[in-house]
Image: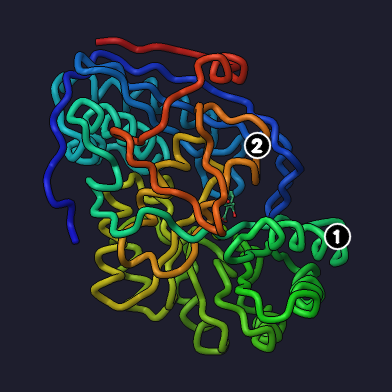
Amino acid sequence: MPIASAAASVALEGFELRVLHLPLVAPFTTSFGTETVREVIVVRALTSDGDGWGEIVTMAAPLYSSEYTQSAWDVALRWLAPALLDRGRLAPEEVASVLAPFVGHRMVKAGLELAVLDAALRSEGRALGEYFGAVRDRVPSGVSVGIQRDPAALVDAVGGYLDEGYARIKIKIKPGRDIADTAAVRDAFGAITLQVDANSAYTLADVDTLAELDRFDLLLIEQPLQEDDLVDHATLARRLRTPVCLDESIVSAKAAADALALGAASVINIKAGRVGGYLEAVAIHDLCRDAAIPVWCGGMLETGIGRAANAALAALPGFTLPGDVSASSRFYTRDIVTEPAVLEDGHVRVPTGHGLGIEIDPVALEDFTVVRETLTR
Ligand code: OSB
Ligand code: MG
């Protein structure tokens, strides 16, 4: 289901970029590191028809992907924002083609595109979900649980999220913290919907360990091998009963089509930042739906900006598995929007206001800002 009707064009006047530091409610540990503060870039598109907001989901260090805060900041200000500003008037659907000559830097492209899209839809009085073709007014909410001190602490953490009503649990694993952790959660909570995420921490040499996970009836295993190991993922998938889901490897609709053709994945995690924008994300949704491949919406510890956009994306019909679209309180005690996403009966509501359907809390935005720069035409 491609976008039914294009958004209005906007007359771009500038971009305001900010680096924010948002404290996390608790440290978040994955196979690639521990985060205690979410460093993120917020984009404000300044147009003659009003402002729009976007979020560049890079992290402080290039550990999840090659992008990181300072690379994003540099390429946005030096190359990508100027290329868009040169165009003057443009429609959100043109952002990707204007930025296509610049190789990579997909999270930056996604954040800039979202800000333009928000401005355009706000000016038209249209909601992002409606623009995408949302078929739900709320989406089931899964939670991503970091590696804890030991399996007992993991069981405690998971128990808390289940009490809150989360519809699906994902636990992070890494070599040495896989079988016992998964066993502890399965033993403690029985038939909950459970999946694991390795964030590229294994190689094909670990196939026997990974095959041990088969006995836990997991919904899927996410990104066991490296980003560019598509053939190895296909080999691994043939050796496992647990479905293989790709995250890091899926950097575009083309990469998704290639992964499916190779048999490297039977489920796909769609993250707009990783694939260069929400419109590319919709394209991946569309091709997976045609191929009867289930998809779910991934997360990057988004602020209220990206969290609203993710809820709208996850409301498309092909998102048949719960996503990492949690309540804001999963990561933050204070968000930068006036009405942070909350959990209601295991779901998060799809905003219906114009554009992203959120309002920025200017005091919170200011309080979390550590650097700011504005580029004008
Ligand atoms: O691999 O899905 C991932 C967070 C940062 C980087 C990568 C990942 C994650 C998460 C958290 O798992 C997802 C979220 O709830 O936002
Ligand atoms: Mg992942």
Q: Which mark is residue 173?
A: none
The reply, left or right, for residue 89 in relation to residue 357 is: left
Q: Which three-letter amino acid code belongs to the residue tagged 1?
A: Ala
Residue under the image location 76 percent in, 72 percent down: 185
Residue at mark 2: C-beta within 8 A of ligand 1: no
Residue depicted at x 45% and y 34%: 305
**Disc 1, disc 2: CB below 8 Å?**
no
Q: Nearer the viewer, residue 158 or 23?
A: 158
- Can you tell which quarter of the image residue 142 is in? bottom right
Three-letter amino acid code at disc 2? Tyr
Q: Residue at x 25, y 50 (%)?
A: 132
Q: Point out residue 251 in the picture as x, y percentages from the top left corner.
A: 39, 55
Ligand 2 shown in quarter: bottom right
Mark 1 vs mark 2, CA separation in Å:
20 Å
Q: Is residue 238 above or below residue 298?
A: below
Which residue in the structure is indicated by mark 1?
153
Residue 10: % across, % down: 17, 24
Q: x, y percentage for residue 58?
A: 52, 38
**Of residues 262 and 160, the one drawn nearer to the viewer in this rendering:** 160
Within 10 Å of disc 1 (Cα), the crowding (few <14, some 14-19, many 20+) is some
Whole-percent x and y of residue 140?
A: 49, 61
The quadrant in which the N terminus is found is: bottom left
Residue tagged 2: 332
Identify the element where label 1 is drawn: helix
Quarter where residue 255 is shown: bottom left
Task: Note whether residue 31 is visible.
Answer: no
